Image (spheres, rainbow, N blue to C red):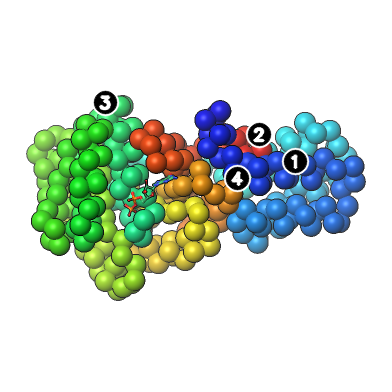
Amino acid sequence: LVRLRSRLSRSQNALGKGLLTLLSRDRLDEDTWEEIEDTLLTADIGVAPTQELVERLRTRVKVLGTRSPDELRGLLRDELVELIGADTDRSLHTAKQEDGRPAVLLVVGVNGVGKTTTSGKLGRVLVADGRTVVLGAADTFRAAAADQLQTWGERVGARTVRGPEGGDPASVAFDAVKEAIAEGADTVLIDTAGRLHTKTGLMDELGKVKRVVEKHGPVNEVLLVLDATTGQNGLVQARVFAEVVDITGIVLTKLDGTAKGGIVVAVQRELGVPVKLIGLGEGADDLAPFEPGAFVDALIG
Ligand code: GDP
């Protein structure tokens, strides 16, 4: 939690401290509630969720007649956790399937959001957990992408399957799963390409990667990686990807570099899919499961 707190310090200062300060004013008048609303909007929580949250807080503060800082903090915490979804299933399917085939995870998203880094970090978590992991370098368009993934693989103890530069991404993905099955590996992480400038091209390509991989059996997770610093832009991207493939989980990266942690709420609403993992830095250990309670505690201090 201490680590999470220090990594989220920008959001914490902007959102958590701001809200607590406002709530602790002598008088919670109309202006103060408006400022609370503005603070939530600035953190990219989104208009509708912000209004809901403020409404609920107002009602509860009124009903309880509470003014003690601890109680106000408690109310704010409860409401934020509720808004994010305390009971949502955020588990990742990474264990071998019943028939002994490896779990297959596709990592998708536009260039630069942190797909390769996330694949590497996730590989590390799984290897540390005793799993055998195969990385599939299906981003064959960006010259350095496969090298970057392979470097991660060597670092974390996972083998990387790659194809010729400019080759067919779907065939690399197919081979990665094939080899993982042959080796009896537990998990395959497939890093895909993310050139969004040609939407149709991306659709065709990503759809094809998924279909080809499914010749081996079902894909367990399609993780959409979004860069938290891009705010509303990320939501537009998310929509485009959701049209192409069924997203099963969101990875929100670069939360360490933004004051807009509220995007967690907005993106879940947008896609109806939970945030499962968060990226908190560039290092190998900077990937964490997303836990609403811990996240909110880190935010509001
Ligand atoms: P890709 O094009 O989607 O595969 O993106 P990369 O994995 O190459 O990442 C792009 C850049 O973002 C790299 O410089 C990463 O080190 C950086 N990055 C990825 N995740 C995070 C994160 O959680 N926090 C920060 N600060 N940087 C990150």
> Which kind of residue does numbered mark 1 sit on?
Leu
Q: Between residues 36 and 241, which one lies in front from this camera angle?
A: 36
> Which kind of residue does numbered mark 3 sit on?
Gly
Q: Residue at x 47, y 60 (%)?
A: 234
**Labelled disc at residue 11:** 4
Q: Which residue is mark 2?
A: 301
**Image check: 214 left or right of 78?**
left
Residue 169: image x %, image y %?
18, 59
Residue at the far right in the pictured view:
27
Give neighbour class at mark 4: few <14, some 14-19, many 20+ (Cα, 10 Å): many
Q: CA distance from mark 1 to mark 3?
A: 42 Å
Q: Residue at x 66, y 38 (%)?
A: 300
Asked if the residue at tag 1 contacts the one at tag 2, i.e. Cβ–Cβ closer than 8 Å, the answer is yes
Q: Between residues 187 and 115, which one lies in front from this camera angle?
A: 115
Q: Which residue is mark 3?
A: 130
Mark sitting earlier along the chain (1/4): 4
Q: CA distance from mark 2 to mark 1?
A: 9 Å
Up the image or down, 30 lies above or below 12; here it is: below
Mark sitting earlier along the chain (3/2): 3
